[in-house]
Amino acid sequence: MTSELAPRYDHTDVESHWYRRWETSGAFHAEDVSQRRPFCIVIPPPNVTDVLHMGHALTVTIEDVMIRWHRMLGDNTLWMPGMDHAGIATQMMVERRLKKDEGKTRHELGREEFVSRVWK
């Protein structure tokens, strides 16, 4: 049997089924009080630069394997999004935007104003 691959990957074709299954099974839930040993990995948010590379794929793959392994061991597992890991890249993007939009550097803006823009 021969079937052609779609020219582009459409996540809704594949992932909607699996996501519903994972939500229904409680895969995204960990008990805050449990007799089981806790295990948690924090997922960083996407890069501010929008540039993904093999390092990202490798890291997420390893995290995924570790979470699945600990879940199969019966541990109280949680793979939680939200760790900021890209402070330098964020600063770089803010500095580029500042130079483009206002023609200023972070030094000209001053530390307090620059930090307030980064932490919006």
Image: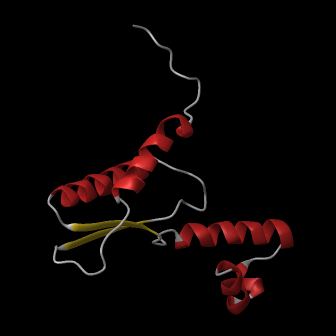
- Quadrant holding the C terminus: bottom right
Figure quadrant of residue 8: top right
108 to 60, vertically: above or below: below
Please say whether residue 54 is visible from this viewpoint: no
Task: Return the residue nearer the eye: 95 or 8.
Answer: 8
Q: Residue furthest bottom?
A: 112
Colour convention of the picture: secondary structure
**Horizontal and vertical percent position of residue 61:** 33, 50
User: Residue furthest toward the top?
Assistant: 1
> Which residue is the extreme one toward the right?
102
Residue 74, percent across and down? 16, 62
The front one of 114 and 119 is 119
Q: Residue at x 16, y 73 (%)?
A: 36
**Residue 37 seen anywhere in this rendered image of the structure:** yes
Q: How many marks?
A: 0
Q: Position of residue 26 (x, y in %)?
A: 35, 60
Left or right: residue 50 versus residue 78 is: right
Q: Quarter of the image holding residue 117?
A: bottom right
Image quarter in which the N terminus is found? top left
Residue shown at the point (75%, 67%) measured from the top left: 97
Is residue 57 positioned above or below 5 on the image? below
Residue 56 at x, y percent in the picture = 42, 53
Q: Between 26 and 60, which is closer to the camera in this rendering?
A: 26
Residue 13's place in the image compared with 107, above or below, is above
Name the residue: 20% across, 60% down.
70
Task: From this view, report whether residue 111 is shown above or below residue 120.
Answer: below
